[in-house]
Amino acid sequence: MRLMLFTGKGGVGKTSIAAATALRCAELGYRTVVMSTDAAHSLADSLDIPLSGEAREVLPNLRAQEVDVLRELDVNWGTLQRWIKAVLAWRGVQELVADEIAILPGMEELAGLLYILHHYDDPQVDVIIVDCAPTGETLRLLSFPDVLRWWLDRIYPIERQAARVLRPIASTFWNLPVPEEEVFDAVKELIQRLLRMRTVLTNASESSVRLVLNPEKMVVREAQRTFTYLNLYGYFTDLVVENRVIPDAVSDPFFDAWRESQRHYSQLALESFAPVPIRRVPLMSQEVVGLEMLRRVSDALYGDDDPTGFYFTGQGREFLRENGRQLLQIRLPFVEKGDIGLTQSGDELTVRVGNQQRNIILPHALAALEVDEAKLEDDRLRVYFRPRR
């Protein structure tokens, strides 16, 4: 099994990159499923083939689907959602409003991602390619297994027993909708599925995330932030795709300023994501729609390579705790010991070692601290943080 998740800021072309990758995998003989979990689907438009909520064969070895998020919400969250709606209605919230706000933040994205398990368990599938919603927040929602497991083992039995005791009293005197047994069963099953999903997505021998970006300031910054949290929560990024790069062959002076800007942010991307490799896809001469254009994209991106390979293994950076101090560990291969320069500005850390430079977006917990010291050991830079003085 090979599982690839494509994510990036909205509008960078990640759907086209995901579809082009799926097409190449299918044409190499892998039994491939490409699925969109974005509520605003565009996979069907990219393939130029009608799709539905169920995976359908669109080419030999290739099935595609646009997950019906509303249907999956009902399947995965329906019981819990109906209880939340009942509590809101009990508090006097208008029924239609209660129906809307009973959808908790992240539920829609998670409902789509949980469908991955359906294909993962299918022995007729070799490759799963996921066109994710344009945000890294979804993956953050799957990143609390220890908390979920602790709650399931320790708090869940207590709450369930308390509900059994309180249910007759609350329903008799206050008409309060105390959760029934089926609600607790639904919560337990959902958490177990989320834990399994987390295990699947963090399996370094099967799964990786591929970041898609354009060489533009806001896009690169958001990709940096996403990359930081992917590393923080244990997901593996094996490739960064820089899409819509203006080709050198374009000689119109109108594009000169754009090309210079792209060069600047391409360099920033190299400094931000190293040692994860970056592959570039040129701005195409026409809209990337249909199989022929997707083949052109896959040729530019992968050449003769097999997309299912891992372009990078391990994590470029790790967030640890050592002897009571927060530690950021960065892979810096082929760097000799020398002067280390560190500049911290808000949530951005710039690291210089010799002629190597890294631009890192810090997670909130580290952004509130300041750098204490840094050491270069073997091919890893270890940066320690302390509370601000």
Image: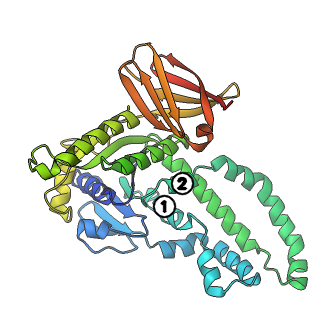
The reply to whether residue 308 is visible in this rendering is no
Question: Is residue 318 at all visible to an observer of this figure?
Answer: yes
Viewer-proximal residue among 39 and 363? 363
At a point 43% along the width and 61% down the height, the residue shown is: 133
Q: Earlier in the sequence, mark 1 or mark 2?
A: 1
Circles 1 and 2: CB atoms closer than 8 Å = yes
Write the residue at 36% across / 55% down. 129
Q: Which residue: 81% across, 63% down?
A: 159
Q: Which of the two residues, 254 or 58, is positioned nearer the viewer here? A: 254
Residue identifier under label 1:
113
Q: Which residue is mark 2?
A: 197
- Judge left or right: residue 340 versus residue 82: left
| Residue 389 location (% of width, % of height) | 69, 30
Residue 236, compared with residue 74, is above or below; it is above
Residue 294 appears at what percent x and percent y? Answer: 20, 58
Name, please, the residue furthest toward the bottom: 95
Total numbered circles: 2
Where in the figure is residue 174, as x and y percent of width and height? 87, 83
> Going 16% across and 53% down the picture, which residue do you hit?
296
The type of residue carrying mark 2 is: Met
Question: Which of these two is toward me, 389 or 114?
Answer: 389
Rounded to the nearest angstrom, the CA distance separating label 1 from label 2 is 8 Å
With respect to residue 58, does 158 lie above or below?
above
